[in-house]
Image (tube, helix red, strand yellow):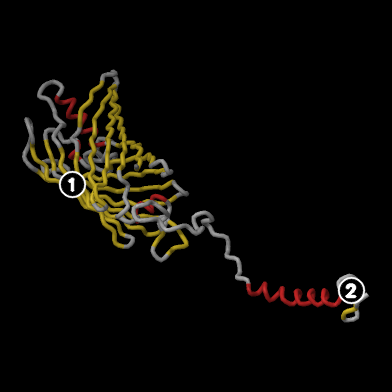
């Protein structure tokens, strides 16, 4: 029986005991040489190594200088490279408003259909078309076409700032007849515009066409907050029978997008519209709040808009007008 350092070592022999001693000495040194395991990532899936997406192919986009925290999907759209937009986007929004008086009520729905085409990385073409639908307490209804709006956009990006600028033209398909139905038709267009707080009012101006010049900015403050600004000027011209002289419409809105969970956003908004010079009250303000759900199959949203002052506001002598908006958008 072999002995090593005075201890009995059956079967191993001197060489076996020597190897065990060397292994015991080497183990702590090897453990010190191993790098410490990183802490658990709050994004266990998104932080795994992934190949960089090729130009024009969608993939995870990270904030400049903050590679450890990826943006959620809607913020990715706000900071994604302009060279890789969606080829086609389609959507529909329904705004509903309701008014009740003694022995009568009126419900107006204004669906707006939208299509957006990317013809080049920085150039997009968009068309939307609204319709005005009315149902009164006597179950009689009416339907009118709004003014289709064709517009072209140029988009750009500078750091975290994304901007759009465009120009468009409306076709004067909204019209009011001369006769007993004319007053009802005009009221229908007025209620349709009120459901949107008079935003993009050229959609609902009968016997008139416009050349809107819109612009928008979006700034990504963080992965959970995006600030937005929208504005537009629109010369308006009389067209067809009943058309009036030219005028100018203007509008401005500020808003934000707050991330509530992985794909649910809260979007407050405050807007102001400068009405035509013939209006008694020249400025119409409104506040809105929208909740958006943004799964992989598109964007769903539900919101409310309240007019704040005359002529449509819920305060003072306004007509107590408000609107409920719901819609769906999908990128292809």
Q: Quadrant of residue 28?
A: bottom right
Residue 250 in sight from this viewpoint: yes
Tell me the residue at 28%/26% (across/down): 106
The residue at which mark 2 appears reads as: 9
Q: Is residue 285 above or below residue 244?
A: below
x and y percentages locating residue 189 in the rendered image: 20, 32
Q: Quadrant of residue 312?
A: top left
Residue 231 in sight from this viewpoint: no
x and y percentages locating residue 78 in the rendered image: 34, 53
* Circle 1 SS class: strand
Tell me the residue at 60%/66% (across/down): 37
x and y percentages locating residue 316 in the rendered image: 26, 40
Q: Is residue 153 above or below residue 13?
A: above
Distance between mark 2 and mark 1 Cα atoms: 98 Å
Question: Which image quadrant: the N terminus?
Answer: bottom right
Tell me the residue at 31%/34% (across/down): 94
């Amino acid at each position: 029986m072999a002995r090593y350092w005075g201890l009995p070592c059956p079967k191993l022999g001197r060489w076996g005991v020597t190897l065990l001693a060397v292994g015991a000495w080497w183990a702590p040194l090897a453990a010190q040489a191993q790098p410490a395991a990183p802490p658990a990532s709050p994004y266990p899936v998104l932080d795994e190594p992934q190949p960089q997406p090729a130009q024009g192919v969608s993939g995870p986009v990270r904030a400049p200088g903050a590679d450890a925290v990826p943006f959620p999907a809607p913020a990715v759209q706000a900071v994604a490279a302009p060279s890789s937009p969606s080829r086609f986007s389609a959507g529909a929004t329904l705004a509903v408003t309701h008014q009740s008086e003694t022995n009568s009520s009126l419900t107006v729905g204004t669906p707006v259909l939208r299509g957006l085409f990317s013809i080049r990385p920085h150039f997009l073409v968009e068309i939307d078309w609204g319709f005005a639908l009315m149902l009164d307490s006597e179950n009689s209804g009416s339907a009118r076409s709004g003014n289709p709006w064709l517009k072209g956009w140029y988009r750009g990006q500078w750091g975290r700032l994304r901007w759009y600028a465009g120009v468009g033209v409306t076709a004067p398909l909204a019209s009011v007849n001369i006769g007993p139905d004319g007053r009802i038709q005009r009221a229908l267009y007025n209620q349709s515009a009120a459901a949107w707080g008079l935003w993009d009012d050229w959609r609902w101006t009968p016997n008139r066409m416009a050349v809107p010049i819109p612009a928008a900015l979006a700034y990504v403050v963080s992965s959970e907050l995006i600030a937005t600004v929208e504005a537009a000027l629109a010369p308006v011209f009389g067209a067809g029978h009943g058309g009036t002289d030219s005028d100018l419409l203007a509008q401005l809105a500020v808003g934000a997008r707050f991330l509530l969970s992985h794909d649910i956003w809260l979007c407050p908004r405050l807007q102001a519209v400068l009405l035509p010079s013939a209006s008694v009250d020249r400025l119409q303000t409104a506040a809105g709040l929208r909740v958006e759900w943004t799964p992989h199959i598109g964007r769903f949203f539900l919101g409310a808009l309240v007019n704040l002052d005359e002529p449509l506001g819920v305060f003072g002598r306004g007509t107590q007008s408000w609107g409920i908006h719901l819609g769906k958008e999908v990128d292809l």
